[in-house]
Amino acid sequence: MEYNPVTLILLLAWLLCGIRVLDKVNASPAKWRRKKEDDGKHGIEWLILFFGPVFLLVTAGKEFWETRLQNVFVRVKRRARYGGITILDSRGSPLYGDDCDNPAVDAFKDIFLEAAKRGASDVFFDPAPEGGTALRFRIDGILVAQEPLVSGLGENVISAVKVAAGMNIAEKRRPQDGAFSAMISGRPVSFRVASAGAAGGEKLTVRLLGAGSAPRTLDEIGFSDDQLRLLKRSVSLSSGMILICGATGSGKTTTLYGLIENIDFSLKNVISIEDPVERVIPGVSQMEVNAAAGITFAGLLRNALRQNPDVICLGEIRDEETAQIAVHAAQTGHLIVSTIHGNDAVDTFDRLTGLGVPLRSLAATVRIIVNQRMARRLCRKCRAPLPELPEKWRAIFAENKIDPSGVCRAVGCPECGGTGFQGRAACFEMLVVDSELREELEQENVSLSKIRQFAQARGASGSLPIHGARLAAEGITSLDEIDRITLSLDGDTI
Ligand SMILES: [Zn+2]
């Protein structure tokens, strides 16, 4: 509590009054009876005596009212609205009970409850240059700064997270990994924790798996009806490769999960190899890569092939060995579904040939390449019409006969945390490797630029801005957002 001079004077006045009143009460009964007749004169002292404490609480405890009580109120309101959070340690036992009265644990719970509620995918704790700990959430692929944690509290919260994740709290410099889980509003959420020493202290990155309002089924992702039909048919193929390419955070994993869920597990043996397992799918044998323990994608893939699988889902193809085993498996009666880091369908061919896979083998195995990006959805509460279409977009709207009257821009309101966006919408292009393209790929000395022309002619490369313009015309996302997501991974605009 903070006292200002006025409250000090009031406190003194109240004490004096108290002493005077007590003086009368403690006086002899005879004196008291006599004095009673004068009570009218001392009424003001009685009033001060009773209302003093009330007055003091109202004026003196300004900070008390504004912070502590308000915090309690906000917390109660938040927990009532979103349900509570129970932290479970790496073995799944409840940690930090509800009656735990530790500000660091309270802050820990509040931070992750808020992160899960706002659909954050990551939470970052970094030492702030001005002292204390900076706190940021990644929401819809964008970093959003939160109220920083004051010096002392931040370090304690980091320690509480490390305890939950089964990490060594004394080790603050060497990188460590850990995990914990929590029940949030009755839903299980897993957290992957990584810590490392940083300039000015320790940084902590926490990945939330299974939280948020991300689409969960293939139908919810945002494919057109034709694309959906094609994709659902493709997972019933008995061999070949289905590839999903895009940048980090482009929702590739969501599409991957959506695809696997469309497989009939009663008829097919499905094995998935992931880093990490983000969602448990009943009916699928899910294996997890653990680089520290020497368990790699390639090693698990070789192991999986001995288990007579029909479909192998690979979290990512990023090394030569995995690429080559995967292509070989796809040629020998297995369907491989995987993601790959790349700008577009043609870039995927480039990357796989870079990993030592001949184009001829790709021609024989790759069936479909999905190139996807995630645009943030405009907040429906505050989006506003865009008065004029920017110069560079006019041609795209005119050439593709898209009506620009529905185009909106981001504004920001309390509902969307002032960002102007809420949730995400996917933007796709899809390349189907048919006999015509296969012939092209099998030719001697075929160049990637030729394949690119081919893909562009079919709208499977370079067409994301057009898809984006259609999304923007429906008011789903903004043109700035389409600009942002169609920037290629190398930084050039497509
Ligand atoms: Zn809004």
Image: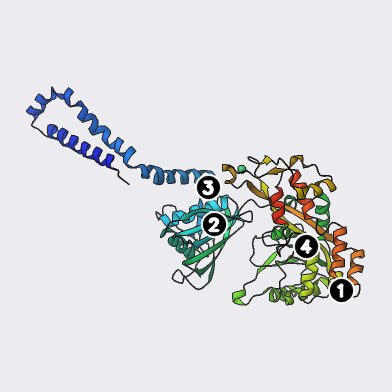
Mark 4 belongs to which amino acid? Asp
User: Is residue 484 rendered to the left or right of residue 56?
Assistant: right
- For residue 18, which quarter of the picture? top left
**Inter-mark Cα distance, 3 to 1:** 55 Å
Q: Mark 2 and mark 1 in contact (Cβ < 8 Å)?
A: no
Looking at the rendered structure, the secondary structure element under dot 4 is loop
Q: Earlier in the sequence, mark 4 or mark 1?
A: 4
**Inter-mark Cα distance, 4 to 3:** 42 Å
- Asked whether the viewer can see residue 183, the reply is yes
Of the numbered discs in the image, which one, if any, rests on residue 344? 4
**Inter-mark Cα distance, 4 to 1:** 19 Å
Mark 1 belongs to which amino acid? Arg
Looking at the rendered structure, the secondary structure element under dot 2 is strand
Residue 458 or residue 282, whichever sits in front: 458
Residue drawn at x 74%, y 76% is: 320
Q: Earlier in the sequence, mark 4 or mark 3?
A: 3
To which residue does mark 3 refer? 83
